[in-house]
Image (spheres, rainbow, N blue to C red):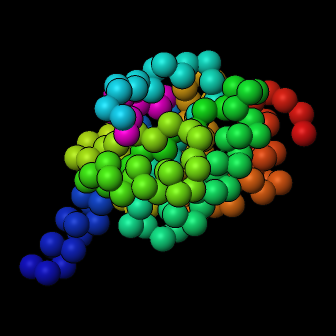
């Protein structure tokens, strides 16, 4: 009986992971969420742009650690067509607003309090999880865990998606 439960759990886990539309080569799921000021923002507004879609939370240490480098990347490439959308799964805007102010983040931060977009649409099971999405809305890469976003390696990936040279 225990073995059967274990196998069913594995099957369920794999089904959730691999039925998600957020794998390389798949079209990124459209969604609408409120930003921290309560304004509705839709993913479809960024058609034709390269999007770094980052799922995070203020209580997540690795998420907090990568935010300054993500902000640096955004500031360096925003005029070339890069959009960073940070989707917080915090249940309240208050800690998110404090974090944004403290770290002077300049990219849009959206709220996914019920985790409908992060879990249901993108199959996020751990934080941070980030999706690199090309100008056509196709997921090019899913990155799980903390990343140094302003590293030469990541800048090269972003430039390639933007269609530019280093």
- Between residue 99 and residue 30, name the one nearer to us: 99
Q: Which of 104 and 31 is in front in this view?
A: 104
Counting from the top left corner in percent of width and height, residue 156 is at 81, 45
Q: Which of 62 and 98 is in front in this view?
A: 98
Where residue 12 appears, x then y in whole percent? 24, 58
Residue furthest left as drawn: 1
* Residue found 15% across the figure and 72% down from its top: 5
- Specify the segment rendered in magenta: 27-36
**Which residue is at the far bottom?**
2
Q: In this view, does 26 lie to the left or right of 81?
A: left
Residue shown at the point (57%, 56%) measured from the top left: 103
Report the number of discs: 0
Residue 143, can we see it? no
Residue 33 forms part of the magenta stretch: yes
Find the residue positioned furthest to the right: 166
Task: Tell me if residue 23 comes above or below residue 127 in the rendering.
Answer: above
For the C terminus, which image quadrant? Answer: top right
Asked whether the viewer can see residue 104, the reply is yes
- Residue 134 in magenta? no
Most prominent secondary structure in the magenta stretch? Answer: loop
Q: In this view, does 96 lie above or below 120?
A: below
Taking 6 as reference, is 88 above or below it?
above
Left or right: 140 in relation to 152: left
Q: Which residue is drawn at 40% across and 26% down?
A: 41
Image quarter of residue 120: top left
- Look at the image and tell me in which quarter the N terminus lies: bottom left
The residue positioned 31% from the left and 32% from the top of the image is 38
Q: Position of residue 85 (x, y in %)?
A: 51, 38
Establish if 134 lies above or below 127: above
User: Residue 141, image x and y in percent?
Assistant: 60, 45
Indicate left or right for 113 with 64 as reference.
left
């Amino acid at each position: 009986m225990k073995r059967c439960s274990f196998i069913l759990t594995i099957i369920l886990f794999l089904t959730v992971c691999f039925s998600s539309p957020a794998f390389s080569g798949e079209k990124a799921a459209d969604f609408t969420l409120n930003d921290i000021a309560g304004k509705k923002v839709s993913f479809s507004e960024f058609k034709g742009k390269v999007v770094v879609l980052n799922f995070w939370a203020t209580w997540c240490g690795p998420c907090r650690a990568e935010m300054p480098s993500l902000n640096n990347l955004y500031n360096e490439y925003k005029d070339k067509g890069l959009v960073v959308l940070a989707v917080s799964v915090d249940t309240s805007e208050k800690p998110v607003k404090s974090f944004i102010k403290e770290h002077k983040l300049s990219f849009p931060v959206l709220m996914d309090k019920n985790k409908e977009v992060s879990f249901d649409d993108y199959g996020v099971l751990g934080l941070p999880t980030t999706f690199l999405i090309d100008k056509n809305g196709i997921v090019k890469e899913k990155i799980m865990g903390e990343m140094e976003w302003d590293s030469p390696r990541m800048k090269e990936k972003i430039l390639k998606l933007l269609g530019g040279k280093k």
